[in-house]
Amino acid sequence: MNAKAIRKLFNITGISLLLIFMFIIPNTMAGKVQLPKDKTVKVSFDPGKEISSGKLKTGDTVKIVLVEPIEIGGVSIVESGATGKAVVVEAKKAGWFHKKGSIKVEFVELDTKGEFRAADGGKIKLSGVLDKKGGIKFFPSILPFLIGKGGQGKISSSAIYAVTVKESIFLESK
């Protein structure tokens, strides 16, 4: 094989590969993407909601919001602002005689937002738990150790929390 034939072969091969990378692979990737189990995502609570053992009870749901977009291979598959929910799995109110309040919240799911949707119309399942206990409040008195009141368990609604995807899910473009 002479040099001219080799160059022609490389040109044909190069053009073929270029066409594959330009048209076939992007169409396949744009159609369906897998969001893997254990991928970390960042969420926060609705800033207008107080997450406190004094305000919420076991079983209450709390709105969460995706803070940063979820990206796979440099492509945003869930836009920031997507909403979801967390559930209060335990809430104990504070009381007198130093009874501390506590609250435990479990992250449950996240809706999709943007070009990609869950293939079966489902939601992105999340995994993560926050558990906060209150402190002790003292009141001026002769016997503060008897009259002190426990503080409510509170979770900051303005903080950003890292949670993980509980199970893999396929998302498809619209």
Image (cartoon, rainbow, N blue to C red):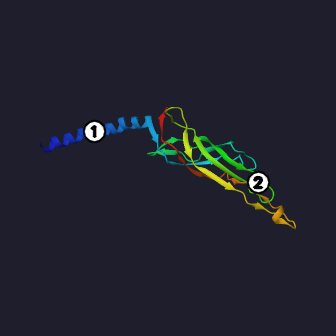
Residue 147, position as x, y percentages in the image: 84, 61
Query: What numbered label is drawn on residue 106?
Result: none
Q: Is residue 52 visible?
A: no
Label 2, secondary structure: give it. loop
Q: Is residue 144 left or right of residue 59?
A: right
Residue 148, position as x, y percentages in the image: 81, 61
View extreme (right): residue: 142
Q: Is residue 49 left or right of residue 76?
A: right
Residue 152, position as x, y percentages in the image: 74, 54
| Nearest to viewer (mark 2 / mark 1) | 2
What amino acid type is highlighted by mark number 1?
Ile
Label 2 close to label 1 by CB (< 8 Å): no
Of mark 2 and mark 1, the one earlier in the sequence is 1
What amino acid type is highlighted by mark number 2?
Ala
Residue 75, position as x, y percentages in the image: 46, 43
Q: Is residue 109 visible?
A: yes
Q: Residue at x 54, y 37 (%)?
A: 114
Q: Which residue is mark 1?
A: 15
Q: How far is mark 2 from mark 1, CA to CA?
A: 71 Å
Q: Residue at x 12, y 43 (%)?
A: 2
Q: Is residue 24 left or right of residue 113?
A: left
